């Protein structure tokens, strides 16, 4: 039975859905749906994801990316460039403006989400630095957001695991948070698998924490249908670059 004291949060859990498909789904949910939704996805085939204003020439080793036929996706939200694969844990919140006790602006939403993960996972030294989740001095998750008048989205790519070789496709970004300094990826990143039992454990811990704030109802991927809407998420054609 629905708890009248808490708003409803719809929980959509996926497994190894390609990140292009996930981002297209999230864009549709943001633009055409009015529900509070959490999307969780464990893993994706390897791909590079850039923010909407990202420039491949400045962010990627293009020849290597083209040689190895790695898809490059431009998402509809801002944020930096990441490479994702089967070791990535994705968690996204699509909320109406009044769903949580945080102003709908980037920094308050980052603080709200960081506090949620701290309470859920209780990982020592897990914190928010700049726009990243870190464990001590190393990054374990990157964030991107899309905020509009009545609704916002906050999505995160967590490094459950990663292959160091994949990071060689990414250039050192021209804009870097102060805490990173000029550290290469190998010295800057860490793995959640070193501090947690499994991705599913982290998901269940998050869900238990969210139950304190929301009545949770399950969503099924197969039953979602959307009216026509603006579609900004796309896979880039690198042939002309």
Image (spheres, rainbow, N blue to C red):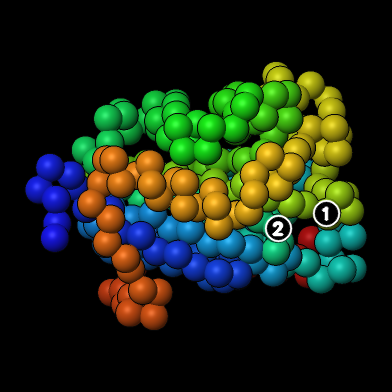
Tell which of 116 and 202 is nearer to you: 202
Q: Is there a contact, CB below 8 Å, between mark 2 and mark 1? A: yes
* Residue 203: % across, % down: 50, 52
Is 182 on the left-hand or right-hand side of 192? Answer: right
Q: How far apart are marks 2 and 1 (CA)?
A: 8 Å
Which residue sits furthest left? Answer: 4
Q: Which mark is residue 142?
A: none
Q: In this view, does 236 lie above or below 37?
A: below
Label 1: element kind: loop
Furthest-front residue in view?
197
**Quadrant location of the N terminus in the rendered image:** bottom left
Q: Which residue is drawn at 33% across and 68% down?
A: 219
Mark 2 / mark 1, whichever is N-terminal: 2
Look at the picture and state if 128 lies above or below 29: above
Can the viewer see residue 41? yes
Residue found at x 55% / y 41%: 143
Q: How would you rate the neighbour count of disc 2 (Cα within 10 Å): few for under 14, some for 14-19, many for 20 or more?
A: many
Specify whether residue 77 is in view: no
Who's the residue at 76% across and 37% down the image? 189
Residue receiving disc 1: 163
Percent position (x, y) of residue 10?
A: 30, 59
Q: Position of residue 130 (x, y in %)?
A: 59, 24
Q: Quadrant of residue 67?
A: bottom right
User: Which part of the image, by quadrant, shows the C terminus?
Assistant: bottom right
Q: Residue 87 carries which label?
A: 2
Q: Percent from the top left, x then y, of residue 9?
A: 28, 53
Residue 58 as seen in the image, left or right of residue 219: right
Crowd around label 1: few <14 · some 14–19 · many ≥20 (10 Å): some
Local SS, label 2: loop
Q: Kindly indicate the quadrant of the structure image that contains residue 103.
A: top left
């Amino acid at each position: 039975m629905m708890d009248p004291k808490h708003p409803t949060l719809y929980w959509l859990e996926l497994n190894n859905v390609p990140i292009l498909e996930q981002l297209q789904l999230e864009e549709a949910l943001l633009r055409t749906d009015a529900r509070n939704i959490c999307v969780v996805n464990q893993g994706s085939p390897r791909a590079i994801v850039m923010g909407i204003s990202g420039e491949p020439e400045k962010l990627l080793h293009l020849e290597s990316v083209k040689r190895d036929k790695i898809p490059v996706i431009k998402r509809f939200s801002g944020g930096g460039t990441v490479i994702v694969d089967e070791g990535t844990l994705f968690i996204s919140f699509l909320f109406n403006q009044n769903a949580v006790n945080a102003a709908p602006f980037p920094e308050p939403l980052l603080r709200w989400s960081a506090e949620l993960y701290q309470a859920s996972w209780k990982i020592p030294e897990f914190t928010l630095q700049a726009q990243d989740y870190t464990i001590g001095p190393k990054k374990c998750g990157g964030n991107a957001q899309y905020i509009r008048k009545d609704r916002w989205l906050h999505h995160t790519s967590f490094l459950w695991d990663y292959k160091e070789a994949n990071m060689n496709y990414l250039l050192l970004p021209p804009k870097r948070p102060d805490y990173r300094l000029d550290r290469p990826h190998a010295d800057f990143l860490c793995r959640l698998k070193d501090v947690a039992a499994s991705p599913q454990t982290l998901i269940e811990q998050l869900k238990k924490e969210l139950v304190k704030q929301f009545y949770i109802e399950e969503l099924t991927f197969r039953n979602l249908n959307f009216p026509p809407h603006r579609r900004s998420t796309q896979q880039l054609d690198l042939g002309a670059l």
